[in-house]
Image (spheres, helix red, strand yellow):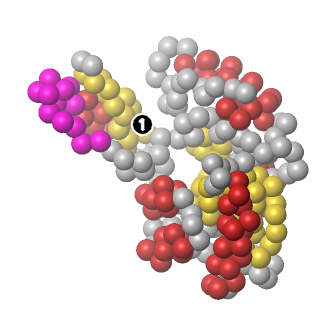
Amino acid sequence: MYFPKYWARGRAGSASCWRWSDTSLSDAQRDADARAAELERLFASGQKLDRYGYSDRPVREEMLEQHAGMALTRNVYGAQILNAESAMFVDIDFADDPSREAPALTQLRSWATQHGLATRAYRTAAGLRALVTDRAFDPKADATSALLHEVGCDPLYIRLCQVQASFRARLTPKPWRIGMRQPGVRWPFDLPDAGERFGTWLARYEAASKAVVACRFVEAIGPATVDPTIAPVLALHDARACGTLPLA
């Protein structure tokens, strides 16, 4: 997994950007200032900018907890994310077409059976989530990406797993599904009162989150085999993300 230790924002004229470092905050600040100055020169010249696509850089997320083989972070809209080094989570999205649920589950069963994978299937608000429990995977490996593509996994999720060197699963609700807006501020909080504003938002979010769950267990496919390295990830995921309350 890769989560940089330090982040800093650089500003130059109308340009603003974030850069990171594993060495020090000053290193991150130096890189951020240099990139912001470069962007300002490009703006002034009218030159077209190359834009980063989804997952072309490390994810800027606050580290909440670290355990062997996994870490919990908070994403841009405030939800808790479980990041796993080798426990393969599968994300299948069909929110715009609920009729795809049955075919998607059938495909997941076929995929797991064909490859001999012990797999747990979950329903989410927008689709299906699966966790392969009987072996570890390398999220950066081409063979892993091919498996995820084969089962119909979200291509953006696959790319993020490769760049971040980890698999991901959301543990808490998306705020707009519980009647809330996004936080409006983002970690690290470098603006006046941003931390206080986020704290107020977080208290409301955590209170509202108690009435929903991120996923609901559907079925186990194949043998109920759990690799020792996967067991802690499975236990934490099911304890914090699953239940019978409404999905969000």
The residue lying at 55 percent from left, 14 percent from top is 193
Asked if one can make out residue 195 in the rendered structure from this viewpoint, the answer is yes
Q: Is residue 50 magenta?
A: yes
- What kind of element bears circle 1? strand
Image spot of residue 233 (x, y percent): 71, 62
* Residue at the top extreme, as displayed: 192
Give the amino acid at mark 1. Trp
The residue lying at 75 percent from left, 57 percent from top is 123
Asked if one can make out residue 1 in the rendered structure from this viewpoint, the answer is no
Front residue of 22/147: it is 147
Q: Is residue 43 magenta?
A: yes
The residue lying at 78 percent from left, 45 percent from top is 247
* Residue at the left extreme, as displayed: 45
The residue lying at 78 percent from left, 35 percent from top is 209
Q: Is residue 242 above or below residue 110?
A: above
Image spot of residue 41 (x, y percent): 15, 27
Label 1 crowd bin: few (<14), some (14–19), many (20+), radius 10 Å: many
Q: Is residue 180 above or below residue 128?
A: above
* Residue at the right extreme, as displayed: 244
Residue 198 falls in image quadrant = top right
Left or right: where does residue 224 sit relative to residue 20?
Answer: right
Q: Quadrant of the C terminus?
A: top right
Left or right: where does residue 78 sit relative to residue 236?
Answer: left
Residue ID for mark 1: 7
Left or right: where does residue 196 sit relative to residue 223?
Answer: left
Image spot of residue 80 (x, y percent): 66, 43
Image spot of residue 136 (x, y percent): 61, 75
Residue 105 falls in image quadrant = bottom right
User: Which stretch appears magenta?
Assistant: 38-51
